[in-house]
Image (spheres, rainbow, N blue to C red):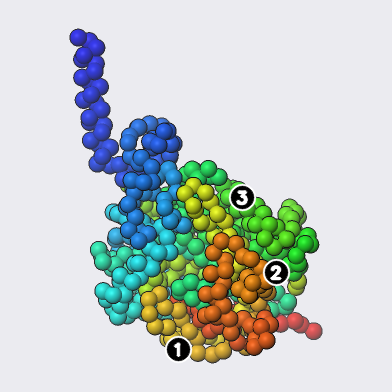
Amino acid sequence: MKIESKSLALSIVSAIIGGAVSVVIGRLLDIGLFLSISGVSVVVVGTACVGMLFVKGRKNIKTNNGIVPITAMYSPERLPGEVFMAELLELPVIISKDRESTTIEINRKNVKDLVVSNAGKTALAEKYAKTNDNNYRSLDRKIHRFISDPESIGKEIVPLKADFRLRWASGGVLSIVTFRGKNWIPLFFRDIKPYGWNVALGSSERHFDKQNRLVNNLNHELMSPERFICREFLEETLVIQERAKPGENTAYKMIMPYGIIQEDEQNRRDFKAGHVELREQYDSMRIHTFPDIRIKAQSINSGMVIKILPSSDTEDAVEQSEVLVCFNLLETGIEVVKLLKYTIGDDDEILDGEILDRYNGRERIRELTRMPVGLLSCEFLNQMFSKGCDHCRYTPGIQPSVEIPDSIPSEHIHLFEWDVKKRFAVVHGDEKGEGSEKERYREWYDKFGENFFDSSCKISTANPSRLFTPATAKILHLFFSCTEPRVWQVPEKRG
């Protein structure tokens, strides 16, 4: 009888707990950690442990053109096609301005879906463009003018609804680089839509170990943009000492922004190790790391603040200052950008550090992305963007680029040649190329070859592309209109 009573009591308690968990599971999981036991996820909340059949592997998670339900955040394995992971916000974004600063408030409550791939981003852009493209373009211009106009004071609300939601979170770093006596901004040439010169931007993502098992909670990045901002920047911006040469040793120059989180420092080291391995394997480039070869980066204040309201009532709101924030409604994005200033050597080279991961079942196949990297002079970019983007033209179609009216003079652009040469060699069959390289580089060459090579197929800066991604164009406008010229101008030498 005692045993039966205890069993009955346990059953009742289990039922109560199960019902309560089913009601609040979405919120509790925001602060949960994951363990995977025989394909069943165990959620640990604080010091209490509740076992439940929540995710039985990625096969049960349905994807819809790169869009998945919020519960997929807790899948213990990488989802099919998962490249990054961002929330689709449901509640309005509030922009508040006074004479001193601008605050953008993000509310993460009530989120239902996530976007996990570029295919998902494209699907969203196509959907919204088909439903009400002209209204979104008009609202896009209105919001940017409010943020960038120093005379605009008060509040502006970015309305979100079932048929229009914005991705959270995405961002990166805008660098002011002193190189050979001039100040420049390094930009990567993006060869997928939206095409053009692009700041080192990326999205929040989950991290997996070498066995493809989840090792972090996405909530950390969604509540702390500085985490993925620093990660994306440090992963994509690879500075090496002296120009790259096959078969020779060179040194990796570690950029050290102030306040990097130790956990992210380890992630960066692991990522760089993988990149260095690929460079040696495919380029015969031997890159070594020395603790005393570093680049000190100085943070620049922008006068903007982003405030993030959590999805759970158990967490506190987070504020982050010294950022620029721009809205790109035509790509359903909000970009959070930090400003850094540093110097590189006259013979240093910047390489694209991004790695393209493809999956064949559980097997991971890694390729170098090799986006062309160029330095564009602050002097020229200030002329183009300090007064806004209204004089620029949006290219037609879904996920448009911004085209500037003026050509970029050759003295205002410096192109790092290593990966441009490697792309050319793969296109023309001088090198085999790995995985999708030949297809990717051929498409780039057919569309933009004339912007990187002259008629004799030699690398040239006589006709650089005038395309910029919309987010980069807006960031450049905010930077040059909101910061003092002394931030980017080179001081005149006296005497």
User: Left or right: where does residue 490 sit relative to residue 224?
Assistant: right
Residue type, label 2 = Glu
* In the depicted structure, whether residue 326 falls above or below residue 151: above
Q: Quadrant of the N terminus?
A: top left
Crowdedness near tag 3: few (<14), some (14–19) or many (≥20) residues, C-alpha within 10 Å:
few
Question: Element at badge 3?
Answer: helix
Crowdedness near tag 2: few (<14), some (14–19) or many (≥20) residues, C-alpha within 10 Å:
many
Which residue is pictured at 24% across the width and 12% down the height? Answer: 3
Which residue is pictured at 69% across the width and 63% down the height? Answer: 283
Which residue is pictured at 24% across the width and 18% down the height? Answer: 7
* Residue 65, quarter of picture: bottom left
- Residue under numbered circle 2: 349
* Residue 112, quarter of picture: bottom left
Precedes in sequence: disc 3 or disc 2: 3
Crowdedness near tag 1: few (<14), some (14–19) or many (≥20) residues, C-alpha within 10 Å:
few
- Of the numbered discs in the image, which one, if any, rests on residue 270? 3
Q: CA distance from mark 3 to mark 2?
A: 21 Å
Q: Where is residue 388? Give x, y as percent.
A: 46, 83
User: Left or right: where does residue 21 sit relative to residue 394?
Assistant: left
**Between 466 and 156, which is closer to the camera in this rendering?**
466
Q: Quadrant of the C terminus?
A: bottom right
* In the depicted structure, whether residue 170 falls above or below residue 363: below
Residue type, label 3 = Asp
Residue type, label 1 = His
- Of the numbered discs in the image, which one, if any, rests on residue 491? none
The answer to whether residue 35 is seen in the rendering is yes
Precedes in sequence: disc 1 or disc 3: 3
Q: Nearer the viewer, mark 1 or mark 2?
A: 2
Q: CA distance from mark 1 to mark 2?
A: 33 Å
- Residue under numbered circle 1: 391
